[in-house]
Image (cartoon, helix red, strand yellow):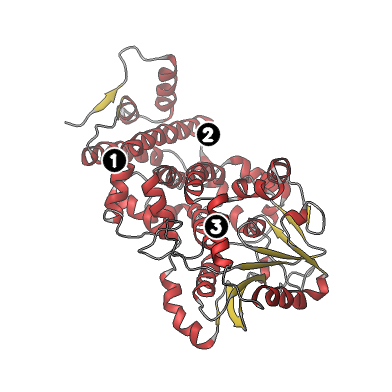
Amino acid sequence: MATTHTRAASPTASDQTDAAVLASVLPGNAASAWWNARPTASGDYRRDVGTFGKSWQQASALLGALPKKPARNAAQARAASLIQRTDRADRDTFLKAHTETLYRALTKDFSAFLRIADFVYAAAREVPGLVPTREQVERESAFVQRDKDGVEIDQGILLSHVFDHPAAGAHMCHAMLLPKQESLEALPHFLERGRLDLEGASVERRGKAVYVTMRNRRFLNAEDTGTIPDQETAIDLATLDAVSDIAVLRGDKVEHSKYRGRHVFSAGINLTHLYFGKIPFVWYIERDLGMVNKLLRGLSRPESPPDVVPVNSIEKPWIAVVEEFAIGGGCQVLLAVDYVLAANNAYMTLPARKEGIIPGLANLRLPRFVGDRIARQAIMYGRRLDCDTPEGRLICDEIAPADEMDAAIARVVDNFTSSGVVSAVGNRRAVRIGQEPLDLFRRYMAVYTREQAYCHFSPALISNLERHWNVHQRVA
């Protein structure tokens, strides 16, 4: 028989208050029945899937009986928050007991590789109620960010437990470092023609170098759901190109009136899309485990886990070219490449404080570039770092006049390749093992996935966007 816990005969004052909150807005006995009989982990996976799943379904029905978030009064909002908070505590209980069993079930005992989105939606089918289904996320995506209930927070809780598990977390990192299927399908075309144009990026071989150009011209090459998948594909192709020795990452020329016809590296996350609810939570995680981590670690092979001796990754040195600015996610990318060439008028910022989110892996990586104090100032207080300053040069390796960047890029590529790059990959691996071994990265992701999920749906994010970005006046 499934083990459940029942509220004590003499409930605490807190229990009584919480029960009263539910009773005040939810008629009948469904709320009290759910509140007084929630499951505890029995140790039996299948049994717990059933008992916890039943409780989560009851909680979902209670939330469904309330008005939609924008129409709730104060008492209804308190009740919704209580249901979600209690439900999420039960998810932690379930996952503390069964993360490895769940991960083994979804990956066929670590033999199958699932990307993040595929994994969380497979988990929704395997354990109903643990995380939202694809249909539930799509329904909530119709709302602007402030009007969402945040069902995707449960994905962050699940991923946090996966990354906290050494074997499951390492396997998930391995899965995300494999070339995408789309990349493998596009590879013959690229190898034949030496160029591929995608909506969010292009990749082109020129001599000994392969160039990846990031594209989102309307939004100053900002990052969103239309750009990151294409940019990861381009990075896959550039890395798999055996003809070239080195890769260059640059922003395209943009349409914005202030910068029209000029290369811009990146404006970071598309805040307009974020405000209007068009950035799903898993977007952050796939970006940092895929596109950005591949710049740092290269591509893995199915038979060879990343950073496990003998290291058998496919990789090459990356040069990033910063023109105008590298904001937010753009600045994060600079921390994952081997060499940064910047224009003398360019600058970098990590406006996490004004956005209300965690700036990817910058919290882990930036301190080793600029030190702890400057890193905290940049992340928590919005300090701007001009590239052509002592602080900026801690990140940027070379500064060139803004109107001479094409020549500067050619010179840097020639300097890297004129004597060959035989030792470059070995040196990358050696530096990486010393600075950011995969286990450190995995443990960071265990914290990041949970904290970013809550940040992504926090009221502070909306108020920050409205205060600092005037985003409510913009058109998505």
The kind of residue on which mark 3 rests is Ala
Query: Which mark identifies residue 70?
Result: none
| Image location (x, y in percent) of residue 59 | 36, 37
Q: CA distance from mark 3 to mark 1?
A: 46 Å
Mark positioned earlier in the residue sequence (3 or 1): 1
Residue 263 shown left or right of residue 153 in the figure: right
Identify the residue position indicated by label 1 in the image: 53
Q: In the rendered image, is residue 226 in sight?
A: no
Residue 235 lies, with reference to residue 171, above or below; the image says below
Residue 128 lies, with reference to residue 270, above or below; the image says above
Identify which residue is drawn at 67% across, 64% down: 339
Quarter-of-image position of residue 303: bottom left
Residue 121 lies, with reference to residue 453, above or below; the image says below
Instruction: Tell which tag, 2 or 1, sits nearer the viewer.
Output: 1
Identify which residue is drawn at 62% across, 49% down: 365
Residue 123 shown left or right of residue 81 in the figure: left
In front of the other: 169 or 270:
169
Identify the residue position indicated by label 2 in the image: 73
